[in-house]
């Protein structure tokens, strides 16, 4: 059995750990609230842009041959993996990495058939350790990112598809369902195919023609979806970290109770032993 001094040290150490995890839980809760508001606000913009793109494409169906709308034989696929800058978020990072590794192993026979765009330090380190081909990377993303933080990566990914360097583009990320639920998703972003409108159909007047309007709108729409996915993934990250820190805090409390019980029992046994020795010594003197 551990000594009283060891048990006391364990109790104090676990209490200090609980203070840290409890503080991290509260910080993540505050970040989650801001991330949710940011993602919801941006969703309105994405829905409106999708509506405009859909209506123009639908009204001119059959006459538009934009490369971002056309499927072609898949020779090379790109995956944008959204991970965090650090751990302590439960299975948040591992779920994304497992999905990417599974897709790569099932769909490709060699590293020439795919490439990865890594967003987040955790994913980048994992892909490097596995010696997987990385087309680009972005680390140091803030907890509340702006479009400027991911603009270069978004333009690069869309440009790779337009230049036919890749034939498909997939987004792999954690979708935010609720504060206690995140779901890993794989979304094929390019080619866009049929763009579904998010609202009621409307009539737009545009010039010079649909081809030139879509030439500007489609890359903007695809880049906007990448940024919207990042906002969704950030909300899921904060929720996962908040849940993980809450679980750690609860576990620390259970350990403190366990160590306190052991400490009290050991202290009681020590006192009983001392009383027995005193009584035994007094009896020997009689």
Image: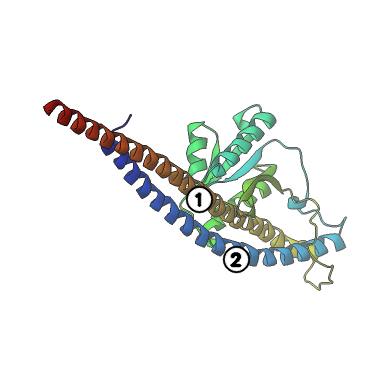
Q: Position of residue 194 (x, y in %)?
A: 81, 53
Question: What residue is drawn where x is 71% and y is 59%?
Answer: 218
Which residue lies most toward the left here? 285
Depth check, front residue: 176 or 145? 176
The residue identified by callout 2 is 37
Local packing at callout 2 (Cα closer than 10 Å; few below 14, some 14-19, many 20+) is few
**Disc 2 vs disc 1: which is toward the camera?**
1
Q: Which quadrant of the rendered structure holds the C terminus?
A: top left
Depth check, front residue: 56 or 242? 242
Can you tell which quarter of the image residue 114 is in? Answer: top right
Q: Position of residue 139 (x, y in %)?
A: 47, 49
Which residue lies most toward the bottom here? 205
Disc 2 to disc 1: CB gap under 8 Å: no
The answer to whether residue 142 is above or below residue 272 is below
The residue identified by callout 1 is 246
Question: What residue is drawn where x is 78% and y is 44%?
Answer: 71
Tell me how far mark 2 sits from mark 1, CA to CA. 22 Å
């Amino acid at each position: 059995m551990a000594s009283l001094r060891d048990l006391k040290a364990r109790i104090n150490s676990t209490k200090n750990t609980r203070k840290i995890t409890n503080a991290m839980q509260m910080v993540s809760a505050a970040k989650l609230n801001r991330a949710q508001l940011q993602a919801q606000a941006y969703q309105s913009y994405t829905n409106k842009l999708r509506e405009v793109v859909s209506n123009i494409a639908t009204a001119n169906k059959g006459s538009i041959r934009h490369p971002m709308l056309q499927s072609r034989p898949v020779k090379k696929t790109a995956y944008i993996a959204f991970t965090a800058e650090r751990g302590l978020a439960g299975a948040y990072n591992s779920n994304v990495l497992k999905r990417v590794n599974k897709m790569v192993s099932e769909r490709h026979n060699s590293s020439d058939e795919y490439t990865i765009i890594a967003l987040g330090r955790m994913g980048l380190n994992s892909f490097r350790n596995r010696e997987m081909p990385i087309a680009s990377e972005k680390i140091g993303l803030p907890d509340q990112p702006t479009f400027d933080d991911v603009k270069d990566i978004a333009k690069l990914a869309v440009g790779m598809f337009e230049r036919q360097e890749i034939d498909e583009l997939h987004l792999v990320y954690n979708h935010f369902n609720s504060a206690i639920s995140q779901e890993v998703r794989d979304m094929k972003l390019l080619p866009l195919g049929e763009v579904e409108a998010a609202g009621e159909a409307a009539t737009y007047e545009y010039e010079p023609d649909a081809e030139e309007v879509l030439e500007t709108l489609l890359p903007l729409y695809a880049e906007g979806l990448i940024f919207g996915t990042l906002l969704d993934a950030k909300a899921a990250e904060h929720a996962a970290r908040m849940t993980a820190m809450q679980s750690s805090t609860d576990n620390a409390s259970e350990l403190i109770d366990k160590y306190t019980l052991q400490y009290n029992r050991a202290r009681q046994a020590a006192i009983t032993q001392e009383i027995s020795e005193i009584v035994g010594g007094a009896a020997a003197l009689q």
